[in-house]
Amino acid sequence: MGDAAGFLQLTLVKAAPLIFAALAGVVCERAGILNIALEGGLTVGAFAAVAMSYATGSPLAGVAAGILAGAMLAGLLGIAATRFNVDQIVAGTGLNLLAAGGTAFGVAVIFGAPGASPEVHALGPRGEAILIAVALALAAVLQLGLDRTPWGLRLRACGENPRAVLSAGLDPRRIRIVATLMGGGLAGLGGVFLSLGELDLYSDGMTAGRGFIALAAVIFGRWTPLSACGTAVAFGALSALQFVLQRSGVPSELMQALPYVAALAALTGIAGRARAPAADGVPFDAG
């Protein structure tokens, strides 16, 4: 029983950043913004949280900074996609590179040594548990919001037929930007969990492709919050499994690859059959 409880706890720890990032992807894509910059959102969120905690001694200030950093990065994507009709895949790729390079530079400047920060005041086990609960609760709240509220109807309409939204007297571009900012904040919170929840420092590359695994969870979950959350938990279980089986003789490299193999299966096996929102990634021109 103890082993089962420990495995469940480890699963949720590994799943939490994926849940936040997957929910970010759902919100953005249901509004019509293809956000492949989730990896960048996790990265800047993790870095900003540690930098603020280092400067102030307050992990709560770090949480706020991480959310804000993720939203600001996503805001660049929202503006590029809605105001300048930049290809969203190109923009997202550029933002991922900007996040990786910018945080690596920031580590060297702020902490005086490249690669990693020193340990900072973190959230501790209680704060980690609260963030896990928040992630699970947000999945339920967003599912209800998308399905049962006027906000959700407008958001889904932007992802399916933004011209109909314009005909109703609303601005699809504004709705998309707000959704992107919201998604960026969620991705930033996933980064906060990595650096101030699971760990107490920031190191280059610590996100380790989790943003792309979260994109796979969005596809597996068919662009719905609860299903994307469930898929993220499944990926978290695969990550936890490597620690459980580390003494079984199975090569550790194989176990570490399991979540990424599963994500690749999602992108190659299900992507062709799952129907994304009709206007996902499609620029909207009010003219």
Image (cartoon, rainbow, N blue to C red):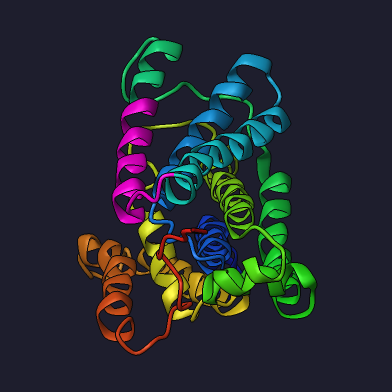
Q: Is residue 221 above or below residue 72?
A: below
* Front one among 145 and 156: 156
Q: Is residue 67 above or below residue 283?
A: above
Q: Which residues are magenta?
A: 84-103
In the displayed structure image, the side of residue 27 where residue 235 appears, left or right:
left
Q: Is residue 131 magenta?
A: no
In the displayed structure image, the side of residue 77 where residue 100 appears, left or right:
left
* Front one among 60 and 255: 60
Please, which residue is most extreme toward the right here?
149
Provide residue 280's location: percent of width, then percent of height: 44, 69
* Front one among 232 and 181: 181
Provide residue 123's location: percent of width, then percent of height: 67, 38
* Front one among 192 and 124: 192
In the displayed structure image, the side of residue 245 where residue 10 appears, left or right:
right
Q: Quadrant of residue 66?
A: top right
**Residue at 27% across / 85% down in the picture?**
269
**Residue at 58% across / 41% down in the picture?**
71
Please, which residue is most extreme toward the bottom here?
273
Dominant secondary-structure state across the stretch colored magenta: helix
Q: In this figure, what is the number of numbered marks?
A: 0
Q: Quadrant of residue 212?
A: bottom left
Kindly tell me whether residue 195 is visible in this rendering.
no
**Residue at 42% across / 85% down in the picture?**
275
Q: Is residue 205 above or below residue 250?
A: above
